[in-house]
Image: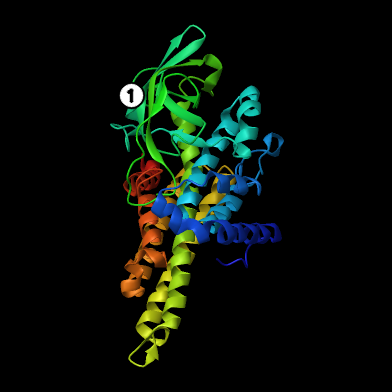
Amino acid sequence: MTTTLLTEDQQALVETTLDFAQDHLAPRALDWDRDKHFPVDVLRKAAGLGLGGVYVREECGGSGLSRADGVLVFESLASGCPSIAGYLSIHNMVAWMIDRYGADTQRERWLPRLCAMEDLASYCLTEPGAGSDAAALTTRAVRDRDEYVLTGVKQFISGAGASQVYVVMARTGGTGADGVSAFIVDKDDPGLTFGPNERKMGWNAQPTRQVVLDGVRLPADRLLGREGEGFRIAMNGLNGGRLGIAACSLGGARSALDRSLVHLADREAFGARLLDAQALRFRLADMATELAAARALVQQAAQALDRGDPQAPYLCAMAKRFATDTGYSVADRALQLHGGYGYLSEYGIEKIVRDLRVHQILEGTNEIMRVIVARGLTEALG
């Protein structure tokens, strides 16, 4: 990652986060992937560096960083383990949503423990029958005097079962986006259960489960924002979440590229180092150039989100699509450059490929990102 255009504070942030990733994530990432182990103790160490509340205001225990700072954090973390960095991005998305839309009592209750990662957080939008068409969700929240009763199932929820806090989107009104509201659900609320841990291609160092709400009764003060605002809250959370996942793709791919450089320098064929073969050097040059272009687009989108630019959702979608496609492509080419060794688990390249593949799906599939970008291009035409 180039640091020539970063401020001194940002350079220090990158160095600190890279050190953490190399000391605490990279040495154990393969074991966590193999054993499907979720290292909560390591997440709490990350919280000691302020990484549990990256965007949360300082008054509630957060770091108060910008989105432009945040993408540097998640790229650096993903160099050690994209799966853990990806979960941290999601946790921080939920914490930001509560900080941005929560009442003071909600912020005071939930955020200090989230920022310390004494409590972990999950984002609950997707359902078995409502993925890309999220506004079609069917989980219901029925008002009963001073309470809401939630019933439904959420699918593909990162951290489910381990997390204590769940921001759940549920229908309080009619069909469509305007009928959706957001709620803060606690793991200990009666009626909340979880499906089995899904068997996945990648992201094995964090659990993925269904979240089942069977008549979960919540006091009315668990409503986040106002009734009917839930879909807007969810989408605004995803703008930042897409940047976090884009940055994680950059970090994982950069790690794969760095490993390829070392591998080609160490290997010989036909009497010369592989690194001296012009065809392979051209491949490396293309990979580095594409990552640099993706990083610039992610940073542009992050800066737009920081300044409240109306085009920020369009740019976030564009950055997410390009960075996750690029990251996966670079990692896949890195595996090819390793030859048979890239296919062996012990070299770590195949894990990066598996982890980065899901980035093209979550936080909105890349096909949906194209829909958002196309809409932004054509809205001015009427």
Mark 1 highlights which residue?
138
Residue at the left extreme of this rendering: 129
Identify which residue, 172 or 79, lies in the foreground.
79
Determine whether, in the image, residue 332 is placed left or right of residue 254: left
| Residue 258, horizontal then vertical, whole percent | 48, 71
Depth check, front residue: 132 or 165: 165
- Residue placed at 55% from the left, 41% from the top? 92
Type of residue at label 1?
A: Thr
Q: Nearer the viewer, residue 5 or 380?
A: 5
Quadrant in which the C terminus is drawn: top left
Q: In which quarter of the image is residue 347?
A: bottom left
Q: Tell me residue 70's x, y (percent).
A: 58, 50
Q: Residue at x 66, y 47 (%)?
A: 48
Q: How crowded is mark 1: few (under 14 residues within 10 Å), some or many (20 or more)?
A: many
Up-down relation of residue 237 to residue 353 (above or below): above
Q: Residue furthest top?
A: 145
Relative to 298, say whether 362 is above or below: above
Taking the view exactly as shown, the residue that stands out farthest to the bottom is: 271
Q: Percent position (x, y) of residue 340?
A: 31, 73
Q: Position of residue 112 (x, y in %)?
A: 65, 34
State how many labels appear. 1
Question: Which element type, helix, strand or loop, lies under badge 1?
Answer: loop
Residue 44 appears in the picture as rendered: yes
For image coordinates 45% across by 11% down, the residue present is: 143
Q: In which quarter of the image is the N terminus?
A: bottom right
* Residue 80 visible from this viewpoint: no
